[in-house]
Image (cartoon, rainbow, N blue to C red):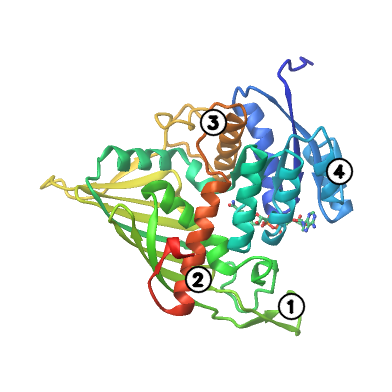
Amino acid sequence: MRQSSLPDLGIGLIGTGFMGRAHALAFQNARTTFDLPVNLKLHALADADAARAEHCARAWGFDHSHADWQQLISDPAVNLVAITTPNHLHCPMAMAALEAGKAVYCEKPLAVSLDQARAMHSAAVKAGVVTRVGYNYQHNPIIGLARNMIESGELGQIISFQGEFSEDFMGDPQSPWSWRCEQAHAGGALADLGSHLLAMARYLLGDIESVCADSQTVHAQRPAEGGSPQQRKIAVDDQTYALLRFANGARGTFGSSWLKHGYKNHLSFEIGGTRGTLSFDQERLNELRLYRAGAPGRDGFQQILAGPAQPGYAAFCPAPGHQLGYNELKTLEVRALIQALCGQTSEGPDFAEALEVERLATAIRVAAKEMRWVTVSEV
Ligand SMILES: NC(=O)c1ccc[n+]([C@@H]2O[C@H](COP(=O)([O-])OP(=O)(O)OC[C@H]3O[C@@H](n4cnc5c(N)ncnc54)[C@H](O)[C@@H]3O)[C@@H](O)[C@H]2O)c1
């Protein structure tokens, strides 16, 4: 077998759940899909469940497994630490990795409090290493096209943003408690889904200056486990809605719910400009809908399909309309991370950007609690 002459980049991945598998797939796919300037070496995998760590390490092609994540971080062969554990563990794991001088690829939301997010950002600045956060949806090539359309003025002046991220995985009141239902471990629908939408709104339209919001816990208790008669109290939001004022003058709405039946990955937005409207729904992630004003007799939305004209798409498939999927967005995210590590780009989203997303989420929480408009720079 041909040996790679490229320098190794040792990957240490923590967590083997939904996102642990997605990261492992993305690292493997990135090696096949792109000509990377480094050899991605799947060096170590950690999970609190030792047997699962060992099993997944073998199945996913990692050389070592650990039950103790600190051993993974202190391994000198690990250059990049990928964190895919429940939200409250992001801070201690990232801080330890930064302290050890490792690059960090952390899942969203960055942290469970603004203080944690601030500390993580400061530690990243001090360490001077690359950080990236898993707002994978913005790596969609067709979202790149949307951003270009907005920035080039194709839609005219942007005046409105209606954004929603709804799913229904907690829609059944009998859906059991999980770490996602714990304020100290997670932060509810706003943290879980809303963080993605806030990152997307900022990616497309820039800073949001002020918010006013409402938040609700609809199901105040849930079974402790599936089918269990024992109930656990729930304090996090099931749904949060907000009004947004963007720095560019646009007005907007925000919604995040994990109760909205029928929706599985409804990260969606409609952006209104003085010359047109653009709409997107992650459940149809290979399509944009564009309405151009001023074409009498040709009224109607145009459907734009994803294809190789959009940077990133052709690496997976040379033919338009053949469609990318969720895991391909994660692979594109890994490519962007590697480019950053090799000094080829400084584009985020890094811990500095994730801190701004957390500031915005905190402003929404404060606005909902105090029932008033909140200037984001207040928090
Ligand atoms: N970017 C996205 O689209 C996306 C999607 C889903 C989840 N997430 C984020 O990914 C993170 C994980 O979510 P998930 O759905 O994969 O959760 P999960 O519950 O499926 O997996 C969590 C994993 O962390 C492991 N773990 C827990 N404590 C640990 C410890 N002390 N040491 C080592 N491992 C430990 C668990 O054993 C499990 O393997 C969360 O922050 C979540 O918000 C992001």
Instruction: Give the numbered dot on residue 365.
Output: 2
Give the label, 1 or 2, closer to the camera.
Answer: 2
Give the label, 2 or 3, closer to the camera.
Answer: 2
Give the label, 1 or 4, closer to the camera.
Answer: 4
Disc 4 crowd rating (10 Å Cα; few below 14, some 14-19, many 20+) is many
Give the label, 4 or 3, closer to the camera.
Answer: 4
Question: What whole-number distance in Å separates the C-alpha atoms at marks 4 and 3?
Answer: 30 Å
Disc 2 crowd rating (10 Å Cα; few below 14, some 14-19, many 20+) is many
Q: Amino acid at mark 4?
A: Ser
Tell me the residue that label 3 is attached to.
Answer: 316
Which residue occupies 74% across, 34% down?
79
Instruction: Give the numbered dot on residue 224.
Output: 1
Q: Amino acid at mark 1?
A: Ala
Question: What whole-number distance in Å separates the C-alpha atoms at marks 1 and 3?
Answer: 42 Å
Q: Nearer the viewer, residue 42 or 21?
A: 42
User: From the viewer's perspective, is residue 52 above or below residue 185?
Assistant: above
Tell me the residue that label 4 is attached to.
Answer: 65
Q: Secondary structure at mark 3?
A: loop
Q: Earlier in the sequence, mark 1 or mark 3?
A: 1
Specify whether tag 4 is near ligand 1 (CB below 8 Å).
Answer: no
Instruction: Give the numbered dot on residue 350.
Output: none
Q: Do the residues under discs 2 and 4 have CB atoms within 8 angstroms? A: no
Question: What whole-number distance in Å separates the C-alpha atoms at marks 2 and 3?
Answer: 40 Å
Q: Amino acid at mark 3?
A: Phe
* Rendering coords of residue 252 (x, y %): 33, 61
- Left or right, 279 with respect to 226, comes to left
- Left or right, 154 with respect to 320, comes to left
Question: What whole-number distance in Å separates the C-alpha atoms at marks 2 and 4?
Answer: 39 Å
Q: Do the residues under discs 1 and 2 have CB atoms within 8 angstroms? A: no
Asked if residue 264 can be seen in this view, the reply is no
Question: What whole-number distance in Å separates the C-alpha atoms at marks 1 and 4?
Answer: 30 Å
Q: Earlier in the sequence, mark 4 or mark 3?
A: 4
